[in-house]
Image: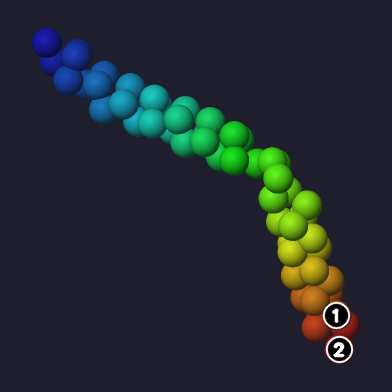
Amino acid sequence: MQYVSALVPPLVMAIGFGFLVRAIIRSQGGAQKGKEDAAAEALVRASQQDAAQ
């Protein structure tokens, strides 16, 4: 039975990681994608202008 107790924690972590990745992928895009992309591009532009000055 030691093999069961040795395999359970990594198995639980792997399943949890899979659900985390799935949630991250599913939250990408959608109705807010354009606003999120515009905000990210604005931040990049602002940081580039600050670096140039």
Residue depicted at x 74% and y 57%: 35
Rate crowding at label 2 as few (under 14), some (14 to 19) or many (20 or more) other CA atoms within 10 Å. Answer: few
Q: Is residue 26 above or below residue 47?
A: above
Give the label on residue 21, or none: none
Residue 25, quarter of the rendered image:
top right
Amino acid type at circle 2 is Gln
- In the displayed structure, 38 sits above or below 24; it is below
Residue at the outermost left position: 1
Is 44 placed left or right of 12 in the picture? right
For the image, the number of numbered tags is 2
State which quadrant residue 48 falls in.
Answer: bottom right
Residue 37 location (% of width, % of height): 77, 55
Looking at the picture, how far across and down is residue 44, in whole percent?
79, 68
Q: Quadrant of the N terminus?
A: top left
Which residue is outermost to the bottom?
A: 53
Q: Are marks 1 and 2 in contact (CB under 8 Å)?
A: yes
Q: What is the distance, in whole Å, between disc 1 and disc 2 at their CAs?
A: 6 Å
Read off the residue under disc 2: 53
* As drawn, 38 above or below 1: below
Q: Nearer the viewer, residue 36 or 52?
A: 36
Residue sitting at x 40%, y 27%: 14
Relative to the observer, which residue lies in front, 51 or 2? 51
Q: Residue at x 73, y 48 (%)?
A: 33
What secondary structure is found at the residue carrying circle 1?
A: helix
Residue at left offset 19%, top offset 13%: 3
Examine the image and state in which quarter residue 50 appears. Answer: bottom right
Q: Which residue in the structure is indicated by mark 1?
A: 49
> Residue 52 vs residue 31: left or right?
right
Q: How many C-alpha atoms fall within 10 Å of the one at disc 1: few (<14), some, or many (≥20)? A: few
Look at the numbered disc 2 and give the secondary structure of its residue.
loop
> Can residue 23 be seen here?
yes
